[in-house]
């Protein structure tokens, strides 16, 4: 049984990953489970895949365990791909969901737009104790609108629409079926299954 540390303390993310890997011979623990006070690594990559690799390497080295890390965010076409890798801190160092969404709406209004095509992207990196690396990516294409609807999601979900519903209006099952993280996790599960045989 391969023990893997998931490089997050986000309980929702941990549950999503555990659900995706149910059929794999792995024991998953999160940073929250090991009561770690490790400082976070500096994520200075240019892409989501770069940052997921930085995180996976860092936590693998710090804990001595195989590690799975993700990096994800929103890319808005009208804003030239912003916020991109800065999605979590789009509105500055002390950013939160509300301030990030306020900035997003403000930037679109400055351009005189009520909506823009956009995509969520998720990159996953697995690093084993011997340095072996597996990577996967997932995308969810949709549209950013100025009106927030729904309360099920987090981050930019209330403003990110797929069809006539925002991500924050979907159930967890509906979201998982179309989400960027769901797609990346399904691809990673296939790779891990093969790798661990």
Image: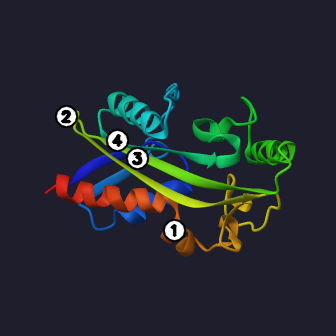
Q: Secondary structure at mark 2?
A: loop
Q: Viewer-proximal residue, 129 or 124? A: 124
Contact, CB < 8 Å: mark 4 with mark 1? no
Residue linked to disc 4: 67
Instruction: Name the mark nearer the viewer: 4 or 1.
Output: 1
Q: Viewer-proximal residue, 151 or 78? A: 78
Residue 130, numbered circle: 2
Q: Quadrant of the C terminus?
A: bottom left
Instruction: Name the mark nearer the viewer: 3 or 1.
Output: 1
At 52% from the left edge and 50% from the top edge, which residue is drawn? Answer: 121
Residue linked to disc 3: 124
Contact, CB < 8 Å: mark 2 with mark 3? no
Q: Quadrant of the N terminus?
A: bottom left
Q: CA distance from mark 1 to mark 2?
A: 33 Å
Residue 178, numbered circle: 1
Contact, CB < 8 Å: mark 2 with mark 4? no
- Residue 194 horizontal/vertical position (percent): 18, 57
Q: Quadrant of residue 150?
A: bottom right
Q: Within 10 angstroms of label 3, few (less than 14), some, or many (20 or more) residues? A: many
Q: CA distance from mark 4 to mark 1?
A: 25 Å
Q: CA distance from mark 3 to mark 1?
A: 17 Å
């Amino acid at each position: 049984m391969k023990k893997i540390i998931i490089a997050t303390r986000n309980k929702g993310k941990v549950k999503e990953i555990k659900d995706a890997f149910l059929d794999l011979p792995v024991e998953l623990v999160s940073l929250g489970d090991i009561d770690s006070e490790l400082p976070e690594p500096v994520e200075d990559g240019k892409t989501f895949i770069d940052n997921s690799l930085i995180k996976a390497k860092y936590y693998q080295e710090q804990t001595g365990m195989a590690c799975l890390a993700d990096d994800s965010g929103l890319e808005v076409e009208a804003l030239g791909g912003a916020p991109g890798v800065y999605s979590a801190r789009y509105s500055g160092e002390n950013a939160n969901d509300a301030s990030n969404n306020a900035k997003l709406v403000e930037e679109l209004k400055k351009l005189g737009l009520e909506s823009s095509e956009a995509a969520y992207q998720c990159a996953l990196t697995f690093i084993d104790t011997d340095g072996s690396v597996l990577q996967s990516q997932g995308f969810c294409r949709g549209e950013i609108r100025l009106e927030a609807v729904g309360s099920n999601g987090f981050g930019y979900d209330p403003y990110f629409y797929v069809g006539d519903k925002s991500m924050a209006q979907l159930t967890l099952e509906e979201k998982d079926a179309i989400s960027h993280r769901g797609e990346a996790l399904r691809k990673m599960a296939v790779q891990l299954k093969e790798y661990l045989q």
